[in-house]
Image (tube, grey):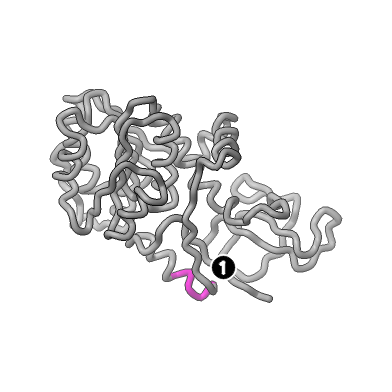
Amino acid sequence: MEGACIAKVVASKHPNYRADELYMMMGSWQDYVILDPGVKKEGFSAIKIPRGVPPYVFLTLGTDLAAIIGMLDIGRIKKGDKVLISGAAGATGSVAGQIAKARGASVVVGIAGGPYKKSLLTSQFGFDEGIDYKNENVQSRISEIFGSSGVDVYFDNVGGKMLDDVLGNMAKFGRVILCGQISQYNNKETDSVEMKHITDIIAKDISMRGFLGMNHLTNPFIILYWIYLFATGKLKHVIDSRNNFDNLPDCFVGLFHGVNTGKLIVENDLS
């Protein structure tokens, strides 16, 4: 299993890499790795983390950029839009909501699981309102909040029935951003969801598009906007930190069941 990680140099024979320095890199679920500085993994070289900068900032980079790309490049969000986000208390959804507010959305609503996550949407991330999909009827709540005018922009991290519920409440010329389908990743054919509102895409002239963040990083504005958000304090993160790599499998599986709030990271202290 590979992904973004923060690694500390414990020993080095390379003049540019010194003991105790921290680097962000693509790594595996392991305690130690021998790194060849001249080799890129997944297109990335190791990035040195400056002293004084919280390491978590670099671990949120991928999900932050997914939120920015989704809202700006795919959703083409504009001032006055009414925005709905699923998986809103997660690493990507929480940032997508903050970007929507920063870009002048008139209403930003998030869907999350449980009263605690719902409360975080308004108290921590600046959403206007939250929907608790575990204890509320999602379709009814969307209709109640957005009324007959509907949702202008939907940032979808969940898919399945929730996507279908939202399609039935989209505005004319609405935009659907397909960032994730977490309810469907382990879905079996027998668990497939009937999409009752799929024809609304035609009737309401809705655009729906998926994306992979790595295909959009050639746009220099994306990184510059991320830096701007951090520099101006407009971006808040909740870091859900767990200890010990032995917990990695459970944490990974837990992502598909919403066990985390914000960015889930696992730390292994080898000192």
Check disc 1 and report its element: helix, strand or loop: strand
Q: Which amino acid does label 1 sit on?
A: Glu
Image coordinates of residue 237 in percent, x first then y, are 49, 51
Q: Say which residue appears at 20% left-offset and 39% top-offset.
A: 145
Q: Say which residue appears at 28% left-offset and 48% top-offset.
A: 130
Camera-nearest residue between 216 and 51: 51
Camera-nearest residue between 218 and 108: 108
Q: How many marks?
A: 1
**Image quadrant where one finds the C terminus:** bottom right
Q: Residue extending furthest front? A: 123
Image coordinates of residue 226 in percent, x first then y, are 55, 38
Most common SS among magenta residues: helix
Q: Say which residue appears at 47% left-offset and 62% top-offset.
A: 240
Q: How crowded is mark 1: few (under 14 residues within 10 Å), some or many (20 or more)?
A: some
Q: Is residue 177 left or right of residue 6?
A: left
Q: Say which residue appears at 31% left-offset and 35% top-offset.
A: 107
148 over 118 or under it: above or below:
above
The residue carrying mark 1 is: 267
Image coordinates of residue 9 in percent, x first then y, are 74, 63
For residue 227, which quarter of the picture? top right
For residue 191, which quarter of the picture? bottom left
Camera-nearest residue between 140 and 207: 140
User: Residue 103: within the magenta?
Assistant: no
47 over 134 or under it: above or below:
above
Q: What stretch is highlighted in magenta?
A: 245-249
Image coordinates of residue 156 in percent, x first then y, are 32, 42
